[in-house]
Amino acid sequence: MDSAQAYGYMLYFVSLMTMGGIYAIMCLGLNIQWGFTGLFNAGIAGFFAIGAYVTAILTTAASTSHLGGYDLPVAIGLISAMAVTAVIAWLVGLLCIRLRSDYLAIATIGIGEIFRLILKNEIWATNGARGIAKIPLPFESLNEPWNKIGFMMLVLVIVTVFYFLIERARLAPWGRLMTAIRENEYSARAAGKNVERVRIEAFVCGSVLMGLAGGLMAHYIKFIGPGATEPLTTTFLVWVMLIAGGSGNNRGAILGAFLLWAIWSFTEVLTGRLPAELAVKAAYFRIFLIGLLLQIVLQRYAGGILPERRPSLNIKA
Amino acid sequence: MLTVDSISKSFGGLTAVNNCSFTIEAHSITGLIGPNGAGKTTIFNVIAGAMKPDTGGVQFQGRNITGQPAHKLFHLGIMRTFQIPQEFFAMTVLENLMVVPAAQSGENLFYALLSPGNVTVREKEVRDRAVDVLDFLRLTHVIDELAGNLSGGQKKLLELGRAMMADPDIILLDEPGAGVNPTLLGDLAEMIERLNKERHYTFCIIEHNMDMIARLCDPVIVMVEGAVLMQGDMNTVRADPRVLDAYLGGDVHGAPN
């Protein structure tokens, strides 16, 4: 292996870790919603898209092709992405949090698609199908590969910080309350818990992380268009990651994200090397393989690779 | 303390509760008996806010609480248990109890994350209390077991445990004795008596075990077909031919026509 090849592998590894990290943030968000609280959010793509477009509009240089840009620092873009997602998730929550889990899934699919279609069709704001380009990558002034490594480190630090925060909240009365509502809402109500309010809180917390992941993805790819917010690569893949990794377990959520992203990415590389006539079919075969993998994991490990574990008496809160 | 005033509740064509009125005196252990389908559980559901009545109202400590949601009634001091145990299935027995108490600041996300001293202190308080309650219920050996794995009787005890965690003014117990073994049933009755005497909890108990009702309850309210048939101490109730009729389907006393 010559040094150019090694350098290529290193860059590939950096991209795996960066994308895996971004998915891990989404997985942690979905874990709060589904893993802890039992909310079936099937509109991940919508919140992801909102986060991505908000930071894109705020941080790009002024442009005639879309709203803004306002040339603001990346940090402000990402924080705004989270804030806007929070407000929208709260409004969505007020509307449909009373629905039972299967109906909530249907409602969120619809709402997620509405957001994506609005972003696709409000051309004055988002440049429609052509998307928003030249989104700044933080650490851009550094030379390659250090800019990419810097961004990877940023993503991994964010994953680590949120992991510790969410794990701490999970083991606190907050996490216990969320799971009590997941397990039995009647009993939770009889114990004085305001089920609707708590559900909205979980919905907002989880969606904020999806918005943040969308924002990070926009900065990483440096471009956001309708294609980047397809439900297949956001909603569907994140669900597979969480279920395979271990719903209700934060470490499982992160493991699932990195593992599934690695598989997703390897299979893309592999299919890219097949002869052209096979490669077209292989693209569909890939999705089939991911589904098959999920089946195998669910058959062998019902609770995912790292299943949920409840705290025992000996664990001090 | 608690007055049910002309409550009616129908489900489609079925009238579960029909113009039902009664009063539960403070510090009493009131029994609520009647044949299956008499509307006892529906009345509990209406009192505890799980259902809204079609007509009529509920007063609690001088306050009109009709139609208030269940979680608000909990904070006013009303705790109920369920006939079919409603445990938090995939949580441990200890957690099942620790969920219940009010005023847990750690349920607020920011306090949970910052975890200042008072959150930790409160958490320890809640845990110690839960450990005591489990000790009382002889469930200590399953403290870290998932509640869903318990036996039917143990789940009934856990229902009662949750009520004990709440420190309410009134506890509505829906068949606390069903499926609990006879030895434990005696302890259960004793515990209800103690909670009534020492902590001054008021109880309203739905139960089909007449020995338990006879031991604990005065007065006893008999419901039939959604309304109160009579009320009195257990001896009076037992002596009343209408009660036997209600349970055995009529025509027991006196010759058939």
Image (tube, coloured by chain):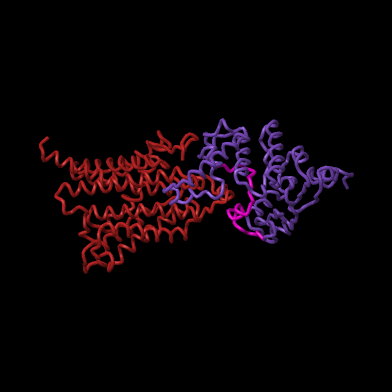
**In the image, residue A301 lies at what x, y percent?**
41, 34
Q: How many marks?
A: 0
In the rendered image of this protein, does residue B8 appear above or below residue A313? below
**In the image, residue A118 lies at what x, y percent?**
34, 64
Q: For residue B73, say whether it is visible.
A: yes
At a point 70% along the width and 55% down the height, the residue shown is: B15
At a point 69% along the width and 52% down the height, the residue shown is: B43
Q: Where does the N terminus of chain B fall, quadrant-wise? A: bottom right
**In the image, residue B192 lies at what x, y percent?**
69, 40
**Of the pair A164 and B128, the residue shown nearer to us:** B128
At a point 48% along the width and 56% down the height, the residue shown is: A97
**Of the pair B239 and B92, the residue shown nearer to us:** B92
- Determine the colour of chain A: red
Please tell me whether residue A168 belongs to the stretch shown in magenta: no
Please state the extent of the stretch shown in magenta in the rendering: B64-88
Q: Residue furthest front?
A: B117
Left or right of A42? Residue B98 is right
From the rendered image, report the letter of the chain displayed in purple.
Answer: B
Left or right of A301? Residue B155 is right
